[in-house]
Amino acid sequence: MSDPVMVLDYWLGDVGPAGWYAGGEDLDAEIRGMWLDLWQAARDGGLDHWGEGVAGSLALIILADQFPRNMFRGDAQAFATDPLARATARRALAEGWDLQAPEPERQFFYMPFEHSEDPEDQALSVALLTERMSSDPEMALHARAHQAIIARFGRFPYRNAALGRDSTAEEAAFLAEGGYASMVNSLREAGV
């Protein structure tokens, strides 16, 4: 079985910032091939002990929050371990472990809140990414875009198909007009 260092070396080193938000079928397949078994172990509670320190918590968050978005793109399983990621992130914040990680990897302690459909988590995400990732204002911009979508719809409309939810007419129009990217651009143009 892998250890947290292997997850961190892969995500922070091999994939790196250029690949974190790029996605694509090749990366998705690579992550699925390399990490599916470990993700399943985390989902089933077999890696809870990783959440006992900085490196282990960060690796568990990446495994539970980032990897499934690649492994299961367009499928409900992409969000199956979000509660685990949020719980691990909450503990890390309470322990101050996030501040022991340098930017840019620190952002991954905050992504579980940005990915949440809970307005309180969204507010926390904006605060954390604004205050603790100050070297990259784009991080706060994207957090505000997620928050604005939740404020407007109460959920992320681009997840509806994967989660078997019907889209409202307003959500369908939002998606047709560019969805998330259009929200980011609107906020950028408004200087928010």
Image: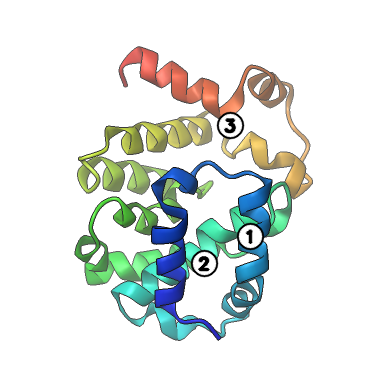
Q: Nearer the viewer, residue 93 or 63?
A: 63
Can you tell which quarter of the image residue 71 is in?
A: bottom right
- Marks 3, 1: nearer the viewer: 1
When the figure is inspected, residue 120 is found, relative to residue 182, above or below; the finding is below
First in residue order: circle 3 vs circle 2: 2
Q: Position of residue 70 (x, y in %)?
A: 62, 53
* Left or right: residue 133 compared with residue 162: left
Count neighbours of disc 2 (C-alpha within 10 A) and say few if under 14, some if 14 to 19, many if 20 or more. Answer: many
First in residue order: circle 3 vs circle 1: 1
Q: Position of residue 160 (x, y in %)?
A: 71, 40
Residue 78 in sight from this viewpoint? no
Q: Position of residue 80 (x, y in %)?
A: 64, 62
Q: Secondary structure at mark 2?
A: helix
- Gap between marks 3 and 1, in whole Å? 33 Å
Residue 20 in sight from this viewpoint? yes
Q: Amino acid at mark 2?
A: Leu
Q: Amino acid at mark 3?
A: Phe
* Left or right: residue 41 compared with residue 143: right
Q: Position of residue 22 (x, y in %)?
A: 53, 41
Count neighbours of disc 1 (C-alpha within 10 A) and say few if under 14, some if 14 to 19, many if 20 or more. Answer: few
Q: Which residue is mark 1?
A: 30
Q: How many marks?
A: 3
Q: Nearer the viewer, residue 174 or 7?
A: 7
Can you tell which quarter of the image residue 52 is in?
A: bottom left
Q: Secondary structure at mark 3?
A: helix
Q: Residue at x 60, y 26 (%)?
A: 179
Q: Which mark is residue 63?
A: 2
Q: Are marks 1 and 2 in contact (CB under 8 Å)?
A: no
Q: Amino acid at mark 1?
A: Glu
Q: Which residue is mark 3?
A: 153
* Left or right: residue 147 compared with residue 138: right
